[in-house]
Image (tube, rainbow, N blue to C red):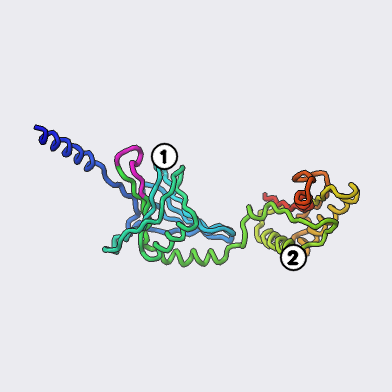
Amino acid sequence: MVSYSKFITVLCMFMLVSTAQAITFRASIDESEWVLESSKFECKLSQQIPAFGIGEFLHEAGVEPLFTLKPTQRLAIKRKATLVVEASPWQPGIATSVIGTLQAARVLKTNAVYAGQMLVSLYKGMSPTFTVDRWMNSDDQLRVALSAANFKAAYKDYISCVAGLLPANYRQVARTAVLFPPAAWALSDATRERLELIAFYVQEDKSVTAIYIDGHSDSGGRRLLNRDLSKQRAEEVSRYLISLGVEESMVTTRYHGERYPVVPNTSKTNRARNRRVTIRLDRE
């Protein structure tokens, strides 16, 4: 009788386990389409995953590429996901390899290392696949896969787009502070290099409509002399930007002396941070 009870228990457990299954979303070979959106600001390569959402590689100017899996349903993924690389249907016999795990929020977003490994695997004809246990609070496993069908031609165009990206994006140049030694206003080599990047970006991004240059000093010395020093620093920055081709009408130059320190002038290190000119870009 005891053995019979054990048999029934095992049988029930087997039946419960067998009811769980993997639900897979992947574009078929005929459905697989890679779409490239390209500009000098970003390159976006995406694939629609039927009945699930969209997978998107984004390489923005000045940063490393990322991949984002965007479900159509907001709550489609709420748990930790495992990212693996599987053989495509036309690659029998190739073993699955694990890339890593990710924590899901509203979307699944990889780091640059994972995105790079995914691109390599797709180029080799393999299928990056995300797996999530207990999908939508069920006993089923969710599998969302990218199809490598028709990838290589799109990837070639994607790489061409990446090669034409600007060296920086707007966030990286929109707010800049350059520092000066005591009682000096000459531009250092590092400052000139930074201003050259800003000038190049401004001339490429036509949505930038204004540049605000603000000069500052520390509190060492007389107040009026500090005001004049901050004026010389701000004007030196403005002159250099204009000499690089920035339209003079875009540039507003202001100077404030010691009135707006970013930190108290209580140490040598703090005073060095206050001897600055800030450059702020505004967009439409």
Q: Residue furthest top?
A: 1
Q: Residues within 10 Å of mark 1 (few under 14, many from 20)?
A: few
Q: Is residue 58 visible?
A: yes
Q: CA distance from mark 1 to mark 2?
A: 51 Å
Task: Estimate the x, y position of residue 24 in percent, counting from the top left.
Answer: 31, 49
Residue drawn at point x = 36 percent, y = 54 percent: 129
Q: Is residue 229 above or below residue 105?
A: below
Task: Estimate the x, y position of residue 107 in percent, counting from the top left.
Answer: 45, 46
Q: Which residues are magenta?
A: 131-139
Query: Nearer the observer, disc 1 or disc 2?
Result: 2
| Res 94 → quadrant | bottom left
164 or 184, which lies in front?
184
Residue drawn at point x = 55 percent, y = 57 percent: 60
- The quarter of the picture where the N terminus appears is top left
Task: Estimate the x, y position of residue 185 in percent, counting from the top left.
Answer: 83, 59
| Res 206 → quadrant | bottom right
Report the disc number at residue 189. Answer: 2
N-terminal label among 1 and 2: 1
**Residue holding disc 1:** 75
